[in-house]
Image (spheres, grey):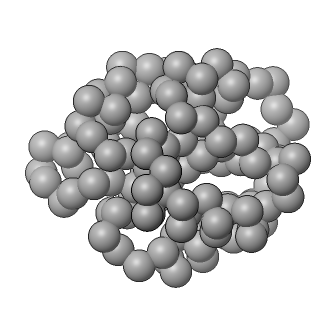
Amino acid sequence: MEVFLYFSEMEGKGREIRGIMEELFRSEQLHVHRSVDNLIQNILGPWDKKPIVVALIDRKDELIDLVSRREQLYPVRLVLVLPEEEESVISLAHRLRPNYLTYIHKDTEDLKSVLRKMSALN
């Protein structure tokens, strides 16, 4: 199973989430991308098992970019980490039909648990 992490900034939370993913998945499974273009190009299969994509969104324009490419994200298990709990951001994020949605200021234990469960589904 392949696991993809997208984040544009390597500051605090990005580093923390990358650490969690490195703990849960083997290095050959984990693919880290810093641009939406690279992420989309690399998640296109074919894959034996449904890949997991964790997208740490820093800015609304990143989310808009992902939404504009949502058709390419549907065959994956999608986890979104949003910057804020603003209604317009949440509404936009739900257009991607994420399997799990959390916020950058939340504790990462739930995220870790969700990733474990998703990896067990494959």
- Measured as percent of width and height from the top left, residue 3 is found at 71, 47
- Measured as percent of width and height from the top left, residue 114 is found at 58, 69
Q: Quadrant of residue 86?
A: bottom left
Q: Report whether 23 appears left or right of 32.
A: right
Q: Does 31 sit above or below residue 54?
A: above
- Measured as percent of width and height from the top left, residue 53 is found at 59, 44
Q: Is residue 25 visible?
A: yes
Tell me the quarter of the image containing the C terminus: bottom right
The residue sitting at 49% across, 57% down in the picture is 14
Q: For the view shown, which residue lies furthest in the left direction?
A: 87
Q: Quadrant of residue 96?
A: top left
The residue sitting at 76% across, 24% down in the picture is 45
Q: Report whether 47 appears left or right of 8.
A: right
Q: Report whether 19 appears left or right of 14.
A: right
Q: Is residue 78 visible?
A: no
In front of the other: 82 or 113 = 82
In front of the other: 58 or 77 = 58
Q: Report whether 110 appears left or right of 24.
A: left
Q: Does 75 sit above or below residue 121?
A: above
- Measured as percent of width and height from the top left, residue 89 is found at 20, 45
The residue sitting at 75% across, 68% down in the picture is 24
Question: How many numbered marks, from 0 up?
Answer: 0
Q: Does 17 sit above or below residue 46?
A: below
